[in-house]
Image (cartoon, helix red, strand yellow):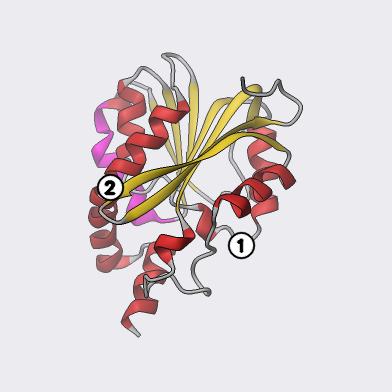
Amino acid sequence: MVWHAIGRQLRHPRGWSGRLIGHVMRLVNDRPNRLAVSALDVQPGQHVLELGCGPGAAIARMAARGALVTGLDQSEAMLRQAARRNRRHMAAGRVALHHGYCRRLPLEDGAVDRVLAVNVAYFWDDPAEVLAEIRRVLAEDGLLVIYVTAADSMRGWKFAGADTHRLYDEAALTSLLTAGGFVSAGVERVTAGPGVTGLVARCRKASARKET
């Protein structure tokens, strides 16, 4: 079924249709990326990890702010697009891209100052395992920002089936982060597009000081 196929491609873009999905994602995710990167408050010299970096648009935005960015994606098609988009930043040593999975991050303990995840939490088969890895690589005063489209917007989307997408409302996202050992500074409802509501969650490790 075509909608199921689209859902699977969003989860793991492959082949020519995956390449097309990447170009669509760059356009659709423009405002979510802007909102999430703003919430991340990236500073020059900070090391940022983006999970599920897709075609690399948010990476380019953060590298332009002077951050050192590591991008991770399970899709080789997306990494090729991200590499083309960030060729200059990679040559300057500001961006590194890795093929891999969120549940096994190729970084040392406490290696990053910020972690960004835009429109990827739907696809985590074991969110607790992913959040444990994020906690491991995040510095003690580090910040995690997650963006998802709200469940009340996504329920009408035929490609977002239960077999490909895990949906979140404010309560579910807050509960997920709390159970994963993070202290949430709140989940903000934002306008992600015409008739589309997004959620931006901003949080730190439970062992770190709470947000003020």
Q: Residue at x 64, y 54 (%)?
A: 127
The residue under the point 26% across, 59% down is: 19
Q: Does 188 appear above or below 13?
A: above
Element at badge 2?
helix
Which quadrant of the structure image shows residue 76?
bottom left
From which residue to which does the magenta span run?
Answer: 75-88
| Circles 2 and 1: CB atoms closer than 8 Å | no
Determine the CA span between mark 2 and mark 1.
Answer: 25 Å
Query: In front: 13, or 200?
Result: 200
Q: Position of residue 39 (x, y in %)?
A: 44, 29
- Determine which of the numbered discs, if any, sits on residue 125 in the image: 1
> In this view of the protein, which residue sits in the foreground, 74 or 128?
128
- 209 in magenta: no
Q: Nearer the viewer, mark 2 or mark 1?
A: 1
Mark 1 lies on a secondary structure that is loop
Q: Taking the image as drawn, is residue 102 in sight?
A: yes
- How many numbered discs, if any? 2
Residue 68, position as x, y percentages in the image: 43, 23
Horizontal side of residue 176 vs 76, given as left or right: right
Q: Which residue is mark 2?
A: 81
Q: Residue furthest top?
A: 44
| Position of residue 30 in the picture relative to residue 197 (left or right) | left
User: How far across and down, in percent of the image, does residue 123 sit?
Assistant: 52, 60
> Which amino acid lies under the numbered mark 1 shown in the image of this protein?
Asp
Magenta-drawn stretch contains 86? yes
Q: Is residue 54 above or below residue 154?
A: above
Extreme-right residue of the structure: 207
Q: Is residue 177 above or below residue 114?
A: below
Q: Main secondary structure of the magenta part?
A: helix
The one of 109 and 146 positioned closer to us in this rendering: 146
For badge 2, the amino acid type reads Gln
